[in-house]
Amino acid sequence: MTPTISVIIPTYNRAAYLPHTLQSALDQQLPEDGSVEVILVDDESTDNTQEVAAAFGDRITYVRQQNRREGAARNTGAARARGRYFAFLDSDDFWLEGKLAGDVARFEQADQPALVYSRGRNVDPQGLIIGERRLANPQGDIFWELAREAFMPMSSVAVRADAFRECGGFTEDPNLSGTADWELWMRLAARWPIGFVEQTRTCIRVHGRNMSADPSYMERAMLAGVRYALADPVVARRARGREGFIRACMYVTIALNAYANGRRGRTWIWLARALLTWPSQVLDARFGGALARAALGPAVVSRMRHAAARA
């Protein structure tokens, strides 16, 4: 039987988290005669990932490839996938019951979105809740909202297989790793409507090995993401005359990542670059928030948050 949705899980040295991740995908139930296939793509792990995969037997499809980063691994999984929809799950994250059922129901609504996403919940390495991710959740033509901010949690996203293939999948450049998802979402959003699913069933582990914890690496990846996105002809047509806005918004993202990793000097550099590139950024609330954080410093911001929480 052809599966309704294919779950694609790229992994590299995540054996400790992998059993929970795989089981959360296998536990997903669809209504009526819908079915789920799970594809694990091992990007040449050096830990005991193969043994973990073997323990799941034929309940999953296991593919091992030469190390080419997660964009290439997701494309490898997509090439093997048979579903009408592809759902992407990072191998240190997991889903709660009903996640894929909600996605499929949204895909089948009248507007037939090319991509659907939902809210994410941050958890610690043991899976205990840290807090909800409070980001924007627009739908329809969201091209400019997405250009301003990457608000879709990667592991919450599912796409129509035909749209994924028409766009060419993920760009396979190691320098883009960490931003390859946003770059593909931009290409999809430039062409088709995007759907939001009102659910919080994606749990995102926060730990020291998250890529966002390496600000120098993320700077390169974010800059590459903008470069590749603007090279796409449909994105370029939508962005014409406002390319500077897209670049400036990414500079603000880089500044926020630098601040989160204790690099306030780099925060100021990237905020200045954003302002020089697109001066009206000074009126944007996101730029203002980043500027306030940089000016006040983490200690003051933390005290203000605690005071607000008590109030």
Image: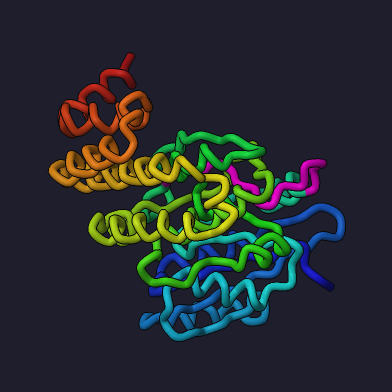
Q: Is residue 269 left or right of residue 2?
A: left
- Residue range of the region highlighted in magenta in the rendering: 108-122
Whether residue 41 is situated above or below residue 127 in the rendered picture: below
Counting every numbered tag in the picture gives 0
Q: Please state which of residues 211 and 240 is positioned toward the viewer in this rendering.
A: 240
Q: Nearer the viewer, residue 101 or 29?
A: 101
Q: Percent x, y for residue 183?
A: 49, 56
Nearest the eye: 133 or 226: 226
From the viewer's perspective, is residue 58 above or below residue 104?
below
- Left or right of residue 135, residue 280 in this image: left
Q: Residue furthest left?
A: 265
What residue sits 41% from the left and 47% below the top?
Answer: 123
Q: Height in image: 281 above or below 8?
A: above
Q: Quadrant of the N terminus?
A: bottom right
Q: Residue at x 23, y 31 (%)?
A: 293
**Position of residue 214 measured from the top left corner of the image (x, y, whole percent):** 26, 58
* Image coloring type: rainbow
Q: Looking at the image, which residue is at 48% across and 60% down?
A: 231
**Residue 264 occupies quadrant:** top left
Would you identify the image quadrant in which residue 131 lies? top left
Q: Is 146 inside the magenta-drawn segment? A: no
Query: Is-magenta flag for residue 116?
Result: yes
Q: Could you tell me which residue is drawn at 68 percent across and 48 percent down? A: 192
Name the image quarter holding the C terminus: top left
Q: In the visual, does 160 lie left or right of 95?
A: right
Q: Position of residue 174 (x, y in %)?
A: 38, 71
Q: Is residue 206 visible?
A: yes
* Residue 15, visible in the rendered structure: no
